[in-house]
Image (cartoon, rainbow, N blue to C red):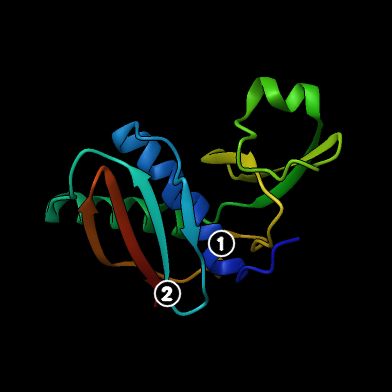
Amino acid sequence: MKQYDPKMHSTEHILNQTMVRMFNCGRSFSAHIEKKKSKVDYHFERDLTEKEVFNIESKVNEVIKSKEEVREDFFNKEEAIKKFNLNKLPEDTGDEIRIIHIGDYDSCPCIGNHVKNTIEIGEFKIISTNYENGILRIRFKLI
């Protein structure tokens, strides 16, 4: 199991779902999750505007403050393939796939540690964004 900080890692899930819902860009394809600050990369067409950054922060914080339960379910691989993108899972993943649910907001396969409830996370803040060669990087922290 990955040893990501549970608060930051759970926040990454919420941010990914927010990006999917707001921009239809898909989940991040690369992430570096640390306790102090983290970064995620998305396939994107440009940098974000200040208003978009504000809207992302607002939505992520709204989900955090809504006290969503974070739970896990297990699916057999055949069933999971039909419902979820399994591309990020290691090749040697067994026949049982762990799915993390953040309330009704997000569900995805994951092997990392998470909080039990979003209220444990704190406040989400985007530190910076930049765009280069089709990649949008978002750096964030929790305060």
Which of the 4 image quarters holds residue 83? top right
Question: Is there any visible trace of residue 43 in the rendered image?
Answer: yes
Q: Nearer the viewer, residue 50 or 139?
A: 139
Which percent across, then down, holds residue 31?
A: 48, 57
Mark seen at residue 9: 1
What amino acid type is highlighted by mark number 2?
Answer: Lys
Quadrant of the image for the C terminus?
A: bottom left
What residue do we see at 30% from left, 47% from top?
Answer: 135
Residue count near mark 1 (Cα–Cα under 10 Å), binned few <14, some 14–19, many ≥20:
many
Label 2: element kind: loop
Residue annotated with mark 2: 37
Total label count? Answer: 2
The one of 31 and 75 positioned closer to us in this rendering: 31
Q: Image height check: is 103 above or below 113? A: above
Question: Does residue 124 show up?
Answer: no
User: Residue flagged by tag 1: what amino acid is it?
Assistant: His
